[in-house]
Every structure is written in C-alpha cells, then in structure tokens.
Amino acid sequence: MNPDRSTEGFTPLTYLNLIQRGGTEDWKRLYRLCHDPGIARQVASMLAMRDPDLMPSARIWKFLLEDLHPELNLSIDLMESRRSIGV
C-alpha cells in the first residue's frame, strides 16, 4: 500500500490512510509509531475525519490509543452521532 498516494511527503493523513486502507503489517508499524506520544496525538486527531463507512477501524484505534497512552487523556470523539453511514 502507498500511504502517500495523494502527497509527496508523509503527513497526518498518511495515518488515516493506514488505518482505513492498510493491511496487518501497516497497522503493526503504525502501532509501533504510536508509542511516541506526539504521533499518538496526531493519529487521534485524524480519527474523526475517517470515512463514515469505516467506523469499526476508527473504534479499534480509539481504544488502542487511549489504552496505550492513558496519561494523555486523549478523549477521542469519533462524532458517531453526527455522521451518517452510506448505503
């Protein structure tokens, strides 16, 4: 998978692409990266921008990040009630 398919460089949107479209190895790599609190914050900030049809992966990452860094008090709001799911 090319996580930077719409940019020339690595951006926070890359995290979202990995979460929504990445495979197991991509997720493992992202989880390792998320041990860095700064990266974990960036990933958390992108979760609300996910595709509404891909909510399950966002829920998993919300749990992983909040469990990995309880000291950050991430309080990730996925805005589930404010997004409609496609048909």
Image (tube, rainbow, N blue to C red):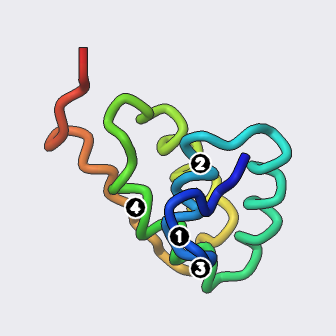
Residue that badge 4 annotates: 76
Q: Quadrant of the C terminus?
A: top left
Say above or below: 15 vs 39: above
Q: How many marks?
A: 4
Residue that badge 2 annotates: 19
The type of residue carrying mark 4 is Ile
Residue 51, given in percent of the width and then of the height, sits at 36, 41
Say above or below: 24 vs 45: above
Image quadrant in which you'd find residue 35: bottom right
Residue that badge 1 annotates: 7
Q: Nearer the viewer, mark 3 or mark 4?
A: 4
The type of residue carrying mark 2 is Ile
Q: Earlier in the sequence, mark 3 or mark 2?
A: 2
Q: Does the CB distance between marks 3 and 4 fall below 8 Å?
A: no
Q: Earlier in the sequence, mark 1 or mark 3?
A: 1
Q: Nearer the viewer, mark 4 or mark 1?
A: 1
What is the number of the mark on residue 71?
3
Determine the secondary structure under disc 4: loop
Q: Earlier in the sequence, mark 2 or mark 1?
A: 1
Graded by Cα atoms within 10 Å as few (under 14), some (14 to 19) or many (20 or more), the crowding at tag 1 reads few
Q: CA distance from mark 3 to mark 2?
A: 23 Å
Q: Does the CB distance between marks 4 and 1 fall below 8 Å?
A: no
Graded by Cα atoms within 10 Å as few (under 14), some (14 to 19) or many (20 or more), the crowding at tag 2 reads many
Q: Nearer the viewer, mark 2 or mark 1?
A: 1
Q: CA distance from mark 4 to mark 1?
A: 26 Å
Q: Earlier in the sequence, mark 3 or mark 4?
A: 3
